Image: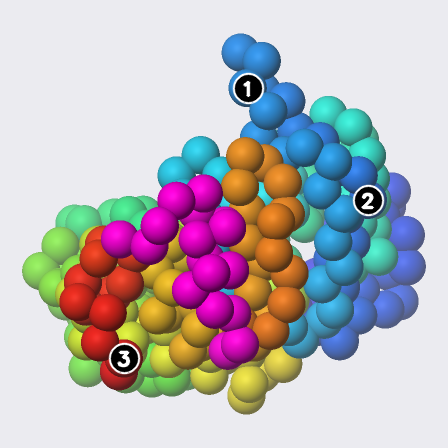
Amino acid sequence: MSSHPVGSLAGQWAGSATVADPAHWAISLRDVTVRYPNGTVGLNGVSLDIPAGSMVAIVGLSGSGKSTLIRTINGLVPVTAGTLTVGGCAVDGARPRALRALRGEIGMVFQGFNLAGRASVLQNVLVGRLAHTPLWRTLIGRYRGSDKQLAYEALDSVGILPKLYARASDLSGGQQQRVAIARALTQQPKIVLADEPVASLDPPTAHSVMGDLRRINEERGITVLVNLHLLDLAREYGVRLIGMRAGEVVYDGPAASASDADFERIYGRPIASGDRLAGDGAAR
């Protein structure tokens, strides 16, 4: 567990005695609307309850609102209307300090990896400790032994520990994404949000990365939300499937039983070969 729960970092967050436990980190949206400054509606009256420990695949085409949903949960995109609580704490209207504290407890995994290419794998993974490390240690690179141990364990859990001192830019795309996942784990997060984490990976590597995320959910009890557009991966690795279209939830149910007709309703068009991981519709 983090040594700095959200409640201790930002006094305006209620329930500091309980929010440090991942088991209490549910997500609740009530009629949430997000309108960007240019007038574009990212979310339109979305209401969802995501219990702690869930494994959720969020699917939809580009512009459907799935990335907005994840970034709103993380406080990166402000709520225009409605209410959003994460770990029992109100995100809508929260002060900047509280939002920074929230982000310290939520691991983010991006499509583009967001690694420092010239830095070593270890240095990249230790970035996950920034929210829990005194500023002076960060500035001079003097991380505590306990922080390094967390990094070693996270790298080992995704099978990338032998690359500890390699430069991030020397790794394959799949290896870089594993480093990004290890960085998120080193935060000791209560929630992991992954925004199209396998979009740029080949099919075998995509399955490996999704397997890592599922194992994190199953073994650590951490809530994992993954944005995807490939129906094969959504069915295989999601337990719950949320389908987004035009900023609204158009499907919410078990992932494994979602039919092609359900995906066609989500996508608003017939399923194309590019909607499947292998491109040929073959099941893995």
Residue that numbered label 2 is attached to: 30
Up the image or down, 45 lies above or below 266; here it is above
For the record, the magenta segment spans 256-272
Q: Quadrant of the N terminus?
A: bottom right
Between 202 and 179, the one lying in front of the other is: 202
Q: Residue furthest top?
A: 38
Q: Quadrant of residue 157?
A: bottom left
Mark 2 is surrounded, within 10 Å at the Cα level, by few (under 14), some (14 to 19) or many (20 or more) other residues, namely some
Residue 132 coordinates in the image, percent (x, y): 59, 58
On residue 40, which mark appears? 1
Q: Secondary structure at mark 1?
A: loop
Q: Earlier in the sequence, mark 2 or mark 3?
A: 2
Q: Secondary structure at mark 3?
A: loop
Q: Is residue 183 found inside the magenta-colored segment of the image?
A: no
At horizontal 42% and vertical 64% (from top left) the residue drawn is: 260
On residue 283, which mark appears? 3
At horizontal 75% and vertical 76% (from top left) the residue drawn is: 23
Up the image or down, 209 lies above or below 46; here it is below
